[in-house]
Image (tube, grey):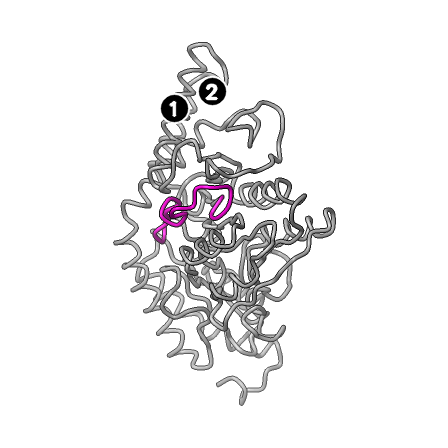
Amino acid sequence: MQVYLDHAATTPLRPEARDAWLAASEEAGNASSIHGYGQSARRLLEEARERLAAVIGCDPIEVVLTSGGTEAVNLAVKGLWWSRSARADAVVLPDGEHHATLDAVEWLRTAERAAVRPVALDGRGAIDPARFAGALPGAALATALVANNEVGTVNDAAALSAAASAAGIPLHLDAVAAFGHLPVSFRSWRGDAAGHTGLSALSVSAHKIGGPAGVGALVVSRHARLAPLLHGGGQQRGLRAGTQDVPGAVAFAVAAELAEAERETEAERLSTLRDELVRGILSTVPSAELLGDPVARIPGNAHLLFAGAGGETLLFLLDQAGVAVSTGSACQAGIPEPSHVVQALGRTDAEARQVLRFTLGRTSGPDDVAAVLAVLPAAVERARAASGTPSAARS
């Protein structure tokens, strides 16, 4: 039995994206070269950029291709900071953000003396737009998740963008977990903001939607001011120097189009499967608790707390049974520490070590749900026994 329920970490490469990558890789030439081979590569690259822009809801010139979501986040956060730090000294940072954002802001705090204005999450993991707006005045920049990558809660991206626009603060939205699974539109979220503030940047990644790993993009408003991380060739509006990955861009575009075309039907299918999984877990492990918003969440996300059972132990036991899940962000894999997202919900350190994240994707089906439910109760009992949890505390 092999059951893969860790699609939020990465989802299998789509055959169409693989074929597109192979076809594009057979084209010789650097997209920055002016000879025929180079111009052929350039055409492929710019067509891919146009296709991505159509899916994301932005202008092609606003799509800056990167090596993935982490680079896109770093370019947004650090680039906005460097362009604004002479006039402001604070970063608005909601609790529970992805570690790409947390670590980038921590670097700014220690290396550049940036002040950090935290914004607490509610008990379901959502950012309160009013609380977010209250932290904005006078800040250098703000950043926020469109949807939490661990507990799956969806934020009101339009309201966060409107708050940033009203306060005159540039905003980065991390849409890596949301893109391909929820409606994402840079243009509509930006609204009427036309200056250097408001929604300025939005990060996405290819391997979360069936594209290749190592490819991502940062949508940068044509009005935004960002300082680059990389220097060397002036490519992509001078924001990201270096030879561009043409096959990766083409494969990303194909994956994005396919994900968007099937998004509504797939969201309905995955929501049904997820609800079946959650009901089954709560029925067979009555003490389990669903975390995150029960309704406003990523369709394939089920994040549960198993009191008294160590998450790492549960993950190991399920893996031995042929079921792949996670305890949280894959970027923290192998590091046995409590989930900072669960802590941001007001939970204890102990509870933050007793969670599992099940994430379904396009290859998931009813048999996968049944397989999990067949092995999970025994795994929870074994994990609780290993932790010394008394039987009376298990129900």
Q: Main secondary structure of the magenta part?
A: loop
Element at badge 1? helix
At 40% from the left and 45% from the top, the residue drawn is: 186
Residue 366: x %, y % from top left: 30, 62
Along the horizontal axis of the image, is 230 left or right of 187?
A: right
Up/down of 292 relative to 20, above or below: below
At 48% from the left and 34% from the top, the residue drawn is: 65
Element at badge 2? loop
The local crowd at label 2, few if under 14, some if 14 to 19, many if 20 or more residues have their Cα within 10 Å, is many
How far is mark 1 from mark 2, CA to CA? 9 Å
Up/down of 352 relative to 137, above or below: below
Q: Which residues are magenta?
A: 180-200
Along the horizontal axis of the image, is 3 left or right of 70?
A: left
At 49% from the left and 14% from the top, the residue drawn is: 33
- The three-letter amino acid code for the residue at tag 2 is Ala
Residue 162: x %, y % from top left: 43, 55
Split into 4 quadrants, where in the image is the N terminus? bottom left
Q: Which residue is mark 2?
A: 31
Tags 1 and 2 in contact by the CB under 8 Å rule? yes
Q: Which residue is mark 1?
A: 44
Q: Nearer the viewer, residue 265 or 296?
A: 296
- Which quadrant of the structure image shows residue 154? bottom left
Q: Nearer the viewer, residue 132 or 274?
A: 132
Residue 333: x %, y % from top left: 59, 55
Residue at the outermost left position: 265
Residue 205: x %, y % from top left: 46, 43
At 34% from the left and 52% from the top, the residue drawn is: 183
Residue 280 counted in the magenta span: no
Up/down of 271 relative to 244, above or below: below
